[in-house]
Image (cartoon, rainbow, N blue to C red):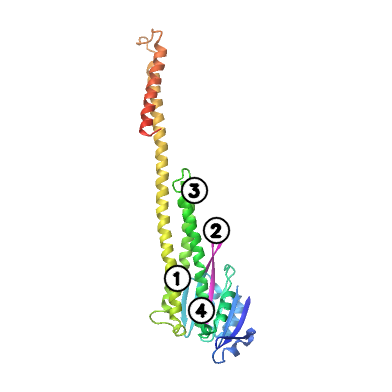
Amino acid sequence: MLINCVAYQDGQKLADIPVEDISEYVRQPETFVWVALRDAQPEELQVMQEEFGLHELAVEDARRGHQRPKIEEYGDSLFVVVKTIDCRDGEVVVGEVDIFVGDNYVLSSRDSHSLQNFLGVRARAEREPHMLRQGPAFVLYALMDAVVDRYFPVLDMLESELEQIEELIFSKGKQRDNIQHLYALKRKVTEVRHAVAPLMEAVGRLHGGRVPSICRDTGEYFRDVHDHLHRISAALDNIRDTIATAIQVNLSMVAIEENEVNKRLAAWAAIFAICTAFAGVWGMNFKVMPELEWQYGYPMALTVMVGVCLYLYRRFRRAGWL
């Protein structure tokens, strides 16, 4: 679905133009066309390929979707894939944005999973004509910067969720639930990292080494995006290490709780074993027994058993087993 199609010249907006006029505007000097699509259909991509002269391999990747974050060069044009990350009801929602960039055009296409729109990016670019004058490279930076900035709230959500779990680590009876929550959090961190790590590697090529000709004058802007991605990556590594430590602590707490239960069971088993031993001996049907004909034999037997059990109970209590 077409969101907007706008022509710009010398940093100023010329007009909203119909798709069929794109090829005429891109031939004008100091002019580029910025098109935004959502859930682009194969027919729409085919039209854009004809109007902009897009490379067939890049169009094929955009048509298939579910691409890894990357930046690929096709002659004098770039094909960029970035992942959008949003929070919905405590869950991480991952979308995809495909961006085609040439000397005189920018085409962005986002899927339905992306909750983020780029109307604010277009408004920001139009408020800064001195920046928009740099052409499609600045638009590419603005789009990538908007996507990466949305990573920070997700990062804050992950850190807050981790802090909430850490507060319950030493709560009795919560260890098993904590482990489940930690593994769910680890899955979210992994999803975010799959979006950040490849993109950080790709953006690094836009400001160092052999920079594509389109981005030659905007390297410092892409360096800023790369720095943001590096910060996010370092924070994700820290969260992942903390999760691993928390999981080990929770497993240790579960083992300690099980050990405490085993000690209690062993203590009570020892106490009842003494009673069983005395009752077994005195309950045997021998004809000649020391207390068989003594009138106080039965009370004495009970007294001895109760006294020994109380003695063991006190010793186990002092040892911390009961």
Q: Is residue 290 above or below residue 199?
A: above
Residue 4 on image: x %, y %: 62, 79
Looking at marks 3 and 4 on the same chain, the residue that comes earlier in the sequence is marked by 4
* Kind of residue indicated by mark 4: Leu
Structural distance between the alpha carbons of marks 1 and 4: 16 Å
Tag 2 residue = 90
Q: Which mark is residue 140?
A: 4
* Kind of residue indicated by mark 1: His
Structural distance between the alpha carbons of marks 3 and 4: 44 Å
Q: Secondary structure at mark 3?
A: helix
Q: Where's the C terminus, which quadrant?
A: top left
For residue 123, which quarter of the picture?
bottom right
Q: Is residue 71 above or below residue 231?
A: below
* Nearer the observer, 155 or 204: 155
Residue furthest out toward the right: 18
Judge the density around disc 1: few (<14), some (14-19), many (≥20) Cα neighbours within 10 Å. some
Q: Secondary structure at mark 1?
A: helix
Structural distance between the alpha carbons of marks 3 and 1: 34 Å
- At 39% across and 46% down in the image, what residue appears? 252
Q: Which residues are magenta?
A: 84-101
